[in-house]
Image (spheres, grey):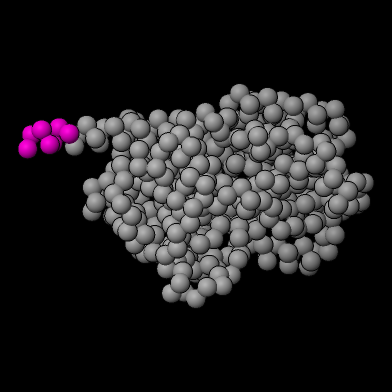
Amino acid sequence: MKIAIVYQYYQGTGSPGHSLIYELAQFLAGRGHEVTVVSGETGYMQRDTPTLPWYRRLRREERDGPVRVLRTFTYSELHRSYLGRLLSFASFSLSGAAGLVGIDKVDLVLASTPPIFPMFAAALVCRLRRVPLVIEVRDLWPESAVQMGILRNPALIRIMAWMERQIYDQSARIVALTEGIRDDIRARGWPEEKLEVVTCGVDFGRLYPDPQGAARTRRTLGWEERKIVLYFGALGEANNIPVILRAARSLRERSDVLFVLVGDGLRRTAIEQEVADGGLTNVSILQPVAKDLARVYLSAADLCLVTLKDIPLFDGAIPTKLIDYMACARPVLCGIRGEARRILDSAQAGLGFNPDDDRQLAGLIRELLADPRRCDRLGANGLAYVQSHFSAEMMRAKMEGILRAVAGTTRAGNAAADGVR
């Protein structure tokens, strides 16, 4: 198959943040498919300032092993403000669509959302070129932005909801990252046969328990005498970092406990200011870490945290960090309801707490840190569970099967049309 993938944040495992699209593209190319990725200029957690003038950044072609990558101009200050993020989305909507128009016709386009604006532009290109579209939905927009209170303008909400409907209607398949996302889309009227679920998976050659790497990390960072409570991931509006900071405040008397936040995002500066203003010397905020190094940080932790804001839509969320923690055999404290909590409970890999209850979180931290054997059991349970249920190889193969089915249906339809003519 000739496949074009449209995703604004294509990046390899040497960059911070998730690399799911990178890994899928490499897998598909390794299976003999011709893969072109149309992407922006930066990863989600990278703050690299472009050095080339804008006119030399309009369209740049790279080779990433067997994958052809087309980088198009993108406003890079997405972490500066919500306006910066909107400008980043808008710029890639225009440049990414132009990049997609400029490549040879493909068998299908796989587009991953959010953001939704570039996906709408990609859908328009697919319609004009009569190319089937497969949309991968990692988050429901605009509803998630509405429930978080980020998006309040009624006109903009209506526009984005209309875009979402147009994209879903046009798509040959809608691939949801979680069952909750699938169920939401189905409940709003899209047919069951159009919907698929392909969850995030773990590459066990990259994420695994690493005691030696953990020991080195603890020595290097001065953690040898500390109990490390780790949050690893985005520092954005959705991630509910305030509940972690409140728990840290209530545990300030525990000089042996250090809360570590590793990541970046729109709220990082505000979080740093809150830590400084509150005198939270038991909180350390580190720069984001490349995926290739994630395991040594995760393995160095005594407990790992996964949190999201308490809104109904996140009942269907499965943060990739939850699966990554479990793959490194770390006990997890989970402040999310719904699907993520059900996974944790089924795996017996940790304990859940109410999303905004910092007192409950602080109590669970005390409880688990006092029982290392229990922590070891929870970690081992989590590792066994993800090995059985969240293999990246299995998920990539499932996605390949979906793409083959769409391409095969399209070829059959074109052949039938040719026969009629």
Residue in view at x 42 percent, y 36 percent: 32
Residue at (42% x, 65% y) in the render: 59
Specify the quadrant of the image occupied by residue 409. Answer: top left
Please give left or right for residue 167 compared with residue 362 in the image: left
Instruction: Answer yes or no: is residue 261 visible.
Output: yes
Q: Which residues are magenta?
A: 415-421
Depth order, front residue of 67/290: 67
| Quadrant in the rendering for residue 383 | top right
* Magenta run includes residue 418: yes
x then y, percent, for residue 192 = 34, 31
Dominant secondary structure of the residues highlighted in magenta in the image:
helix
Q: Residue at x 68, y 55 (%)?
A: 288
Residue 22: give x, y in percent of width and height.
Answer: 52, 46
- Image quadrant containing the C terminus: top left
Q: Is residue 20 left or right of residue 368?
A: left
Q: Indicate whether residue 348 is drawn in magenta.
A: no
Q: Is residue 93 above or below residue 34?
A: below
Q: Position of residue 178 (x, y in %)?
A: 50, 36
Between 236 and 43, the one lying in front of the other is 43
